[in-house]
Image: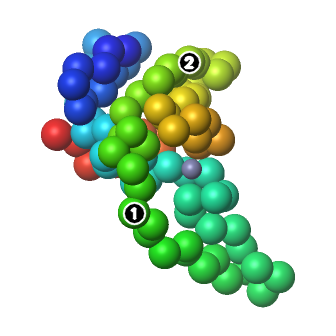
Amino acid sequence: MTALGDTLALKWSDNQESYYQLKTLRDACPCAHCQGEPDVLGKVEKPRLKELPEIAYEIKAYELVGSYVLKITWQDNHSTGLYSFNYLRQLPQV
Ligand SMILES: [Zn+2]
């Protein structure tokens, strides 16, 4: 896993490589705060996209949680998003 400028490169166990723009990853942050939580009726209201400061799109740290989840800590200290590998594979790549 390597962060190059505004791109994150991931190498999968099958040796394929994927490149993601950091902005794509942050905007797709899967945590409840960014994607909204279902209400009592199960409807998910997605919070309006706020203007994020530029540092919100920079990676401060990342770690693997278990074997299939990537946890990213952003420079604005947002770190609740857990990116499963399945989820990452569905995201648009560079
Ligand atoms: Zn989030």
As measured in the structure, the alpha-carbon distance from the residue carrying label 1 to the one carrying label 2 is: 26 Å
Eye-nearest disc, 1 or 2: 1
For label 2, count other residues whose C-alpha is less than 10 Å away and answer few (under 14), some (14-19) or many (20+): few
Residue 51 — which label? 1
Which element type, helix, strand or loop, lies under badge 2? strand
For image coordinates 51% across by 38% down, the residue present is: 76
Percent across and percent down for residue 87 are 47, 44
In this rendering, the answer to whether 4 lies above or below 35 is: above
Q: Amino acid at mark 1?
A: Glu
Q: Amino acid at mark 2?
A: Glu
In this rendering, the answer to whether 1 lies above or below 46 is: above
Q: Is residue 41 visible?
A: yes
For image coordinates 21% across by 25% down, the residue present is: 5
Disc on the earlier residue, 1 or 2: 1
For image coordinates 39% across by 50% down, the residue present is: 53
Residue under circle 2? 63
> 13 or 20, which is in the foreground?
20
> 77 or 24, which is in the foreground?
77
Give left or right: position of 41 versus 34.
right
Percent across and percent down for residue 12 are 37, 19
Percent across and percent down for residue 74 are 49, 34
> 11 or 72, which is in the foreground?
72
Percent across and percent down for residue 55 are 39, 39
For label 1, count other residues whose C-alpha is less than 10 Å away and answer few (under 14), some (14-19) or many (20+): few
The image quadrant that residue 4 belongs to is top left
In this rendering, the answer to whether 93 lies above or below 38 is: above
Which element type, helix, strand or loop, lies under badge 1? loop
Extreme-right residue of the structure: 40
Q: Is residue 25 visible?
A: no
For image coordinates 26% across by 49% down, the residue present is: 92
The CB of the residue at mark 1 lies under 8 Å from ligand 1: no
The C terminus sits in image quarter: top left
